[in-house]
């Protein structure tokens, strides 16, 4: 599936070093399908021990149906659990804008067709401030022009070329690409000294 | 990209092709799997009616959800854990994958048993659906922590699409003080480079401190590379590596060993290798380290005080304040003498025989404080057996600690071992993230096995150097 743009409301969660245990605690990884993961996104931060919901951005009605998540640096650090991007995607997030991402997390996002794009700190801050004031704002993230537009503002985003190409060409699921080199893979398997 | 480094050489040896996307297709020589990150991967294979490409290159174990009190009693009390285990058992049977189950005598934490059984060897590419796959770098193997979709790719094609990393050389010079361990070295490295510092890098560890380390100590360091943001960490070769491999179950025998050794020697970084970045740390100055916050980089030497959040601005201040708030600690307070509730010795970072020996040495003839609950979880069934042969189990039990069966246990609390409410845990594991040890308000102090043992006796964080 080609992904050229994501258009929708944005949800700000601009903190550094948000790890995948926070996105989805390990005790929710005991299911053998990803089906229910959406309801577990940030679950421990969204409610107290009695299950009462707090004012976490993922609970706020203002951000209902948001498609773009706005984050800080090193988002998704820690555990390699794909359950984390699965939880975000199934919650409704279709793209993430941040200053930087942990590598395994970014790889997992690409593997499930969830673009993560890089923006500079000031642009993220300005967008965050705007969304907090005007949560209804529609944000357009365009991978073709490498731009984010909202209201009367816009800023440049970046993404490593292979990742960007894979979304624009619809080849983010690399299975078919990898399967093509079947003979080479067999040869390499036989040539390895172990 | 760095040239003539081990990272480069192993990468090139395993490169199938450059894909049209610009990424390299890399062959994965060894695939280690466990129950948590594979059920959906096998399900996707089944949907496509696909098979496992080279089942002989894949090995499975049960570690994350397994109870540490009587793992042999089936079905498990936790129905989800039972289903997860059954699913793995079914999948490995269907695809002819070797499975180290509870009755194999080889079951254990995936990153402990790989090396222990001689599956992990130098110059390999290794993938596992677990971020601590970096552990295998201690053997000069490139370990890739991957997600479930990528696990499916490795099962079906034995390859991954990857972009080469830059290489940062981290030299630790001098020698370590008595009481300072490999755990303190890696906590110091993460403290210096930061939890984001390793993004985009593989870490090559070198210098006299690493040369003097045993393989088990090197595994502790490489294991936590990922906590510094570096997906891969590795140590260059020497006789210590070869000696460790001799006689292991899956290690090559005699003539094959000699032949393979030639390959292993050929992939060492050249003396004139080019690095993207070099950092030097003086090993003489490293103190026992303890984390005080909610990331593995928020650590201090045992004689230091917590940071003063007022000295920081913007997001740094926000981060410090949220960490202090979660930990219920005052800024500028000492880490020394903080009262703890729980001690956990275990995890893929510190559950090997030498870790258990280090903790037992301190506990011998002493009692765990009456205010503290301590559990000791060996990394594998083999380690458990070895430890019992040496009588370590008796030392732990006599001191009042629980001696358990192997598994990931309270490192991530997917089994019944977990913190309650806001308990403070002195833990030899690798992550102090909020909620990591099973309670949303639980609190974790990462430290070495020696430091955890002395904390258990006193019920407080202590400086191990004063007791040895």
Image (cartoon, coloured by chain):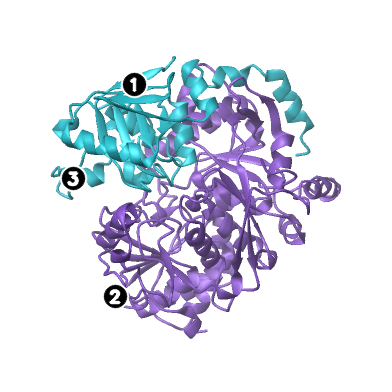
In contact (CB < 8 Å): disc 2 and disc 1: no
Q: Residue at x 32, y 65 (%)?
A: B311
Q: Residue at x 57, y 46 (%)?
A: B201
Which label lies toward us, 3 or 1? 1
Q: What separation in Å lies between label 2 and label 3 (alpha carbons)?
A: 30 Å
Which label lies toward us, 2 or 1? 1
SS at mark 1 in the image:
strand
* Horizontal relation, residue B15 to residue B87: left or right: right
Disc 3 target residue? A47
Q: Which mark is residue B371?
A: 2
Crowding around mark 2 (Cα neighbors within 10 Å: few <14, some 14 to 19, many 20+) is some
The disc, 3 or 1, on the residue closer to the chain's N-terminal end is 1
Q: What separation in Å lies between label 3 and label 1 (alpha carbons)?
A: 29 Å
In contact (CB < 8 Å): disc 3 and disc 1: no
Residue A141 visible, this angle: yes
Which label lies toward us, 2 or 3? 3
* Horizontal relation, residue A127 to residue A109: left or right: left
State the image coordinates of residue B23 (x, y, percent, origin top left): 60, 28
Corner quadrant of residue B426? bottom left
Q: What separation in Å lies between label 2 and label 1 (alpha carbons)?
A: 54 Å
Disc 1 target residue? A6
Palette colour of chain B: purple
State the image coordinates of residue B34 (x, y, percent, origin top left): 50, 41
User: Toward the viewer: B108 or A169?
Assistant: A169
User: Toward the viewer: B183 or B31?
Assistant: B183
User: Toward the viewer: B262 or A149?
Assistant: A149
Crowding around mark 1 (Cα neighbors within 10 Å: few <14, some 14 to 19, many 20+) is some
Asked if marks 3 and 1 fall on the same chain, the answer is yes
SS at mark 3 in the image:
loop
């Amino acid at each position: 599936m080609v992904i050229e743009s994501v258009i929708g409301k944005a949800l700000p969660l601009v903190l550094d070093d948000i790890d995948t245990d926070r996105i989805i605690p390990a005790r929710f990884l005991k299911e053998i399908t990803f089906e229910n993961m959406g309801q577990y996104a940030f679950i421990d931060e969204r409610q107290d021990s009695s299950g009462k919901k707090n004012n976490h951005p993922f609970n706020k009605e203002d951000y209902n149906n948001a498609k773009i998540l706005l984050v800080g640096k090193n988002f998704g650090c820690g555990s390699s659990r794909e359950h984390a991007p699965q939880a975000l995607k199934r919650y409704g997030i279709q793209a993430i804008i941040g200053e930087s991402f942990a590598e395994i997390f970014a790889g997992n996002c690409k593997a499930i067709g969830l673009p993560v794009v890089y923006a500079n700190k000031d642009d993220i801050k300005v967008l965050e401030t705007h969304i907090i004031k005007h949560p209804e704002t529609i944000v357009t993230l365009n991978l073709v022009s490498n731009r984010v537009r909202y209201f009367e503002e816009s800023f440049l985003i970046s993404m490593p070329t292979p990742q960007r190409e894979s979304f624009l060409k619809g080849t983010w699921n690399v299975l078919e690409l990898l399967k093509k080199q079947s003979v080479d893979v067999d040869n390499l398997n036989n040539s390895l000294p172990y | 990209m760095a040239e003539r480094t081990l990272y480069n050489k192993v990468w090139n040896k395993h490169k199938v092709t450059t894909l049209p996307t610009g990424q390299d297709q890399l062959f994965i020589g060894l695939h280690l799997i466990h129950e948590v990150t594979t059920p959906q991967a096998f399900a996707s294979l089944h949907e496509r009616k696909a098979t496992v490409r080279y089942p002989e290159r894949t090995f499975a174990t049960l570690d994350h959800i397994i109870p540490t009190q009587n793992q042999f009693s089936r079905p498990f009390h936790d129905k989800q854990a039972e289903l997860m285990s059954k699913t793995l058992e079914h999948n490995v049977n269907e695809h002819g994958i070797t499975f180290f189950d509870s009755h194999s005598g080889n079951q254990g934490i995936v990153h402990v048993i790989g090396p222990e059984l001689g599956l992990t060897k130098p110059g390999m590419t290794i993938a596992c659906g677990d971020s601590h796959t970096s552990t295998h770098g201690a053997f000069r193997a490139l370990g890739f922590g991957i997600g479930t979709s990528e696990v499916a790719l490795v099962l079906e094609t034995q390859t991954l699409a990857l972009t080469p990393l830059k290489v940062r050389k981290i030299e630790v010079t001098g020698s370590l003080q008595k009481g300072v361990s490999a755990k303190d070295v890696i906590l110091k490295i993460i403290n210096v480079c930061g939890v984001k510092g390793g993004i985009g890098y593989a870490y090559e560890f070198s210098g006299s401190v690493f040369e003097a380390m045993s393989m088990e100590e090197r595994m502790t360091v490489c294991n936590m590379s990922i906590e510094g943001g570096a997906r891969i960490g590795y140590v260059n070769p020497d006789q210590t590596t070869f000696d460790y491999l001799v006689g292991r179950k899956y290690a090559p025998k005699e003539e094959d060993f000699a032949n393979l050794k030639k390959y292993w020697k050929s992939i060492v970084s050249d003396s004139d290798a080019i690095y993207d970045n070099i950092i030097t740390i003086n090993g003489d100055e490293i103190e026992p380290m303890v984390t005080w916050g909610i990331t593995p980089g928020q650590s201090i030497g045992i004689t230091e005080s917590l940071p003063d959040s007022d000295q920081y601005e913007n997001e740094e201040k926000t981060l410090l304040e949220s960490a202090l708030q979660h930990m219920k600690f005052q800024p500028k307070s000492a880490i020394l003498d903080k009262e703890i509730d729980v001690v956990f010795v275990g995890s893929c970072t510190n559950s090997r025989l030498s870790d258990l020996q280090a903790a037992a040495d301190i506990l011998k003839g002493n009692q765990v404080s009456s205010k503290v609950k301590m559990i000791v979880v060996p990394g594998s069934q083999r380690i458990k057996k070895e430890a019992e042969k040496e009588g370590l189990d008796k030392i732990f039990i006599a001191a009042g600690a629980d001696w358990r069966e192997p598994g990931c246990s309270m490192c991530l609390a997917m089994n019944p071992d977990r913190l309650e409410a806001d308990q403070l845990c002195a833990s030899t594991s690798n992550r102090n993230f909020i909620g990591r040890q099973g309670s949303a308000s639980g609190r974790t102090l990462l430290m070495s096995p020696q430091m955890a043992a002395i904390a258990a006796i006193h019920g407080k964080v202590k400086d191990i150097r004063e007791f040895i």
